[in-house]
Amino acid sequence: DWNSGNVIAEQVALIQAQVGTGKVICGLSGGVDSAVAAALVHKAIGDQLVCVFVDHGLLREDERRQVEEDYVKATGIRLVTVDVREQFINALAGVSDPETKRKIIGREFIRTFEQAQAELIKESAEIDGDPIRFLVQGTLYPDVVESGGGSGTANIKSHHNVGGLPEDLQFELVEPLRALFKDEVRAIGAELGLPAEIVQRQPFPGPGLGIRIVGEVTQARLDLLRQADAIVRAELTAAGLDREIWQCPVVLLADVRSVGVQGDGRTYGHPIVLRPVSSEDAMTADWTRLPYDLLAKISNRITNEVDGVNRVVLDVTSKPPGTIEWE
Ligand code: XMP
């Protein structure tokens, strides 16, 4: 009989037993998983936890501000932001293969934490010189299963927070959400008093916009995709569809170009794919039948406002056979 209060009490005790008086670091991604995992750990051990927000440049518009201002205000959690946008762009240069991208992003992510840990120890007297030995991850049950760590299924994709960890990881993992599905995590977040804006946020993959560019990740492509993504989100919210849609990946087909006509002339631009899906737990999904007028509005706005895009297409594939993300 599932009850969020019981799960919280159980996890708080488990976290306390695992870490004792140890120092703990947690990466906030901006999403609900890491936000709830951190709040749970904060409840268990208070200021033994310090959170790190990595701005790797693969974020959505306004995401950094929401974490630095809104989440910190709501929780009182100690937060450090690390700006490694250049490091990530350099590490991803020339790479188009999806699994390679995921592995690189996962590796750089962990390296960034190790660096942050070293700096925190050096800088902060509050830490008493104790090394940070534990790393909190907001890994959910579906992540575990899909990375082959659960019931023996094949490795479908290496999620950055499961399969993509480097061999020489210096932290012991704390994963309080490892047995839970998304709706359970939201219930726990609400029970912990997190604002609805955070608890109800749609999922966004750890590797971010980096796995929504089919092709090499470049600064210009990220800027373009970020702009298209912001338009889609704004229009879905304005239409009141946030709760109905599980998530809507917006994908840039950077290696594909097609002929168009815009203004006075011929263009040779890139397509943007809309991938609205309905789902209970991301294990399976169906494509969401969005109203045609809304699709028309989104299409018009993207092709008018986003330079370099001359076509918007709709993904009408369920999962399976398609995954939700394109990479
Ligand atoms: P797929 O594409 O496998 O996605 O159908 C299932 C759900 O997981 C999200 N996703 C990720 N989440 N790290 C995450 O934290 C990842 O590497 C990752 N890859 C996919 C995806 O957005 C969807 O909600």
Image: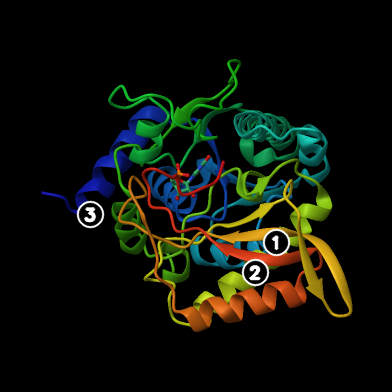
Q: Position of residue 107 (x, y in %)?
A: 65, 28
Q: Where in the figure is residue 72, as x and y percent of width and height?
A: 57, 61
Secondary structure beneath label 3: helix
Determine the residue positioned at 55% across, 62% down: 71
Local packing at callout 2 (Cα closer than 10 Å; few below 14, some 14-19, many 20+) is: some
Q: Secondary structure at mark 1?
A: helix
Q: Which residue is mark 2?
A: 230
* Mark sitting on residue 5: 3
Amino acid type at image mark 1: Arg
First in sequence, mark 2 or 3: give its number: 3
Q: Residues within 10 Å of mark 3 (few under 14, many from 20)?
A: few
Q: Check whether the beta carbons of the residues at disc 1 and disc 2 lie within 8 A of each other.
A: yes
Q: Quadrant of residue 69?
A: bottom right
Nearer the observer: mark 3 or 1; the answer is 1
Q: CA distance from mark 2 to mark 3?
A: 35 Å
Amino acid tagged 2 = Ala
In the image, residue 112 sits, relative to residue 200, either above or below, namely: above
Q: Residues within 10 Å of mark 1 (few under 14, many from 20)?
A: many
Label annotation for residue 226: 1
Q: Position of residue 278 (x, y in %)?
A: 36, 61
Say which label, 3 or 1, has the lower sequence index.
3
